[in-house]
Every structure is written in structure tokens, then in C-alpha cells.
Image (cartoon, rainbow, N blue to C red):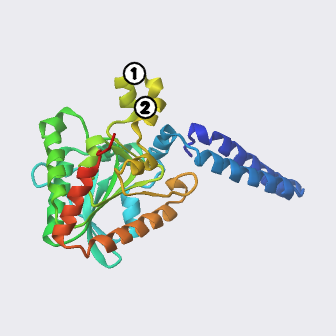
Amino acid sequence: MAIVLEFEKPIIELEKKIEELRKFTQKEEIDLSDEITKLTGRLEHLRKNIFDNLTPWQKVQLARHPNRPYTLDYVSMIMEGFMEIHGDRHFGDDRALITGIARFEGQSVMVMGHQKGRDTKENLMRNFGCAHPEGYRKAMRLMNMAEKYKLPIVTFIDTPGAYPGVGAEERGQAEAIAYNLRAMSGLTVPIVVFVIGEGGSGGALGIGVGDRVFVLENAYYSVISPEGCAAILWKDRARTPDAAMSLKLTGVDLLKMGVIDGVIPEPLGGAHRNPEDTAKEIKKMLKKSLDELLPLLVEKLVEQRYNKYREIGVYKE
């Protein structure tokens, strides 16, 4: 069953009307091509008007769309020979955060990212994309391996946040994320980060320190979810759209503030409407980034990354 968001309903209704006219034309052998053409033109105009003027909250809803491509989808579309590597060698394997080696344009890369499920069973197995500390420790183990063998690192962020359960806290969730932040800042290989859906808080940052950070057009990257922000500031879930606006969590806002390096365009209607075209845009940006980063001397690479994060939040009155 197709998932329809509230702001998409006018589009769906017009699509149904066009389809009904086409079926009626075939059944009754009556030429209604002029009416269909007019409605199709109106549909394209309506679709463009809606998706070119989405509010931050509507973009958050698109970022969470269950049909949206996930990490493994993009890996299969832009890379070859992906081999998943499991386990943190301390506690276990976290299926919410996948890691492995693949080939990109002839270059071996270390790839990792949050992975959600397509149905209830898979979502439970993937923990809805909310990683445990063993997930972040697994990621760090693979990053150290990438540094040893001089492999660039590519990460895909798509999580509401790190898992906040008692077990995760007992096993050192905060320490695992903090360790990754410190270690990634000094890694001697290029790191390219893509926020492909939800970019929630420390759960995103745990694999998010990069030389280049990109956010998809309808993804978001934020210190807290809009719902969480509304609950804290106003104690009112109805203020969630206001919270999304205030958080400045869209790619456009983040680019203006210098938090990210670019916004990757999506097909009209969202990445789930045409995953292949979205993957092509990601592939183009990844190739450009690696072409720029791989020739750099190690000292220059680390210095640039350090300065990049030192400058975030700097402003003049």
C-alpha cells in the first residue's frame, strides 16, 4: 500500500482523476486526450508548486518516508562488490549500523551507514536504524582498518538518534560516540559523509565527522528531533512544525550556516520517487570529493578537517 503524506493528497487526487479518464477513454472509445493533457499539465504545475515550497516539517516527513532509499540501496547502486564486515570484537554485531568494504570507480573504500527496515520484522532486527554502542565501536574498528590500508571512508547517515535504552547506556553509549568524534577528527584518510534521511543528534555524529558533509535535499540534520524540541520548549506536540522551523535543520539552512558542504538535489517528490537518479547525484558528489581529497598530503588533510570544525559556529556581531 502506497504511503501518502498529508501535503501529497491534492497530487494523488489529481493523479487518480487522470487515471480514471484514461480508463474511461479506453472503455468507451471516447477521445478525451485534450482534457487529459490539460489535467496532466495542471498536475505537473501542482507537483512543482508543492515540492518547491515544502516547510522544514514537511521535509522531515519526507526524510522519514518508509519507501525512501536506505544505505544498502545506495551502496548497491553506486558501488561494486560490497562485502559486509560484522562485529565490534567486544560485545556483538549491531545490525542498525552496517559496515564493509566496496569498490567505487576502481577505488577500494570503507563504507558504513545506518540501516532501517522495510517491514516490522526487519525494523525490529535493525532497531529502526538506532545504533547501540557496539555499532559505533564496530564502525571505529573499520575506520582504523581503513586508515591502516589507506582506504577512504564513506558514511551514510539515516537515524533518529542513537538507541537510548538502559542496556545501551550500561555498555557506554555516550563514551562510544565521544570516542568516535575524537578519533575521526584525526584519521589520516579522507572521510565523505552523506545524510540521506534522518540525521538525529549524537547518533548521526557518531559516524558524521568528515572532510566533506552533504545533506540530501529532503533530509535533515539536527541536534534533536522536532518532536523532542517541541516537548522541551513548549511541552506541546502540536508545536512540532514550529520546532522544525526554529531548528534550522534543512540542507539549505545548514549550508548557509557553514555546517555542511553541499545540498544534493532529489527528484521532484523525493528520493523514493526515483532512487536511481538520486544515487547518480550522490555518486557524482562522491567522485568529486574523492578527486579533491585523495591527492592531499596527510598533514594538509587533517589540518583542513580540524579547521573546518573549529570554524562552525564562529560569527561576528
Q: Which mark is residue 298?
A: none
Image side of residue 203 versus residue 234, left or right: left
6 vs 101: above or below: above
Q: Residue furthest left?
A: 90
Give the Cα distance between marks 2 and 1: 9 Å
- Give the amino acid at mark 1: Trp
Q: Quadrant of residue 69?
A: bottom left
Foreground pick, 124 / 99: 99
Foreground pick, 22 / 246: 246
99 vs 228: above or below: below
Give how far across and how far down residue 262 sits, in percent: 41, 58
- Give the amino acid at mark 2: Ala
Foreground pick, 86 / 206: 206
Secondary structure of the residue carrying tag 1 is: loop
Q: Is residue 207 visible?
A: no
Give how far across and how far down residue 20 sits, in percent: 77, 49
Residue bearing mark 2: 243
For label 2, the crowd category at 10 Å Cα-Cα, with few meaning under 14, some 14 to 19 and many 20 or more, is many
Residue bearing mark 1: 234
Q: How many marks?
A: 2
Q: Quadrant of residue 222?
A: top left
- Quarter of the image with the N terminus is top right
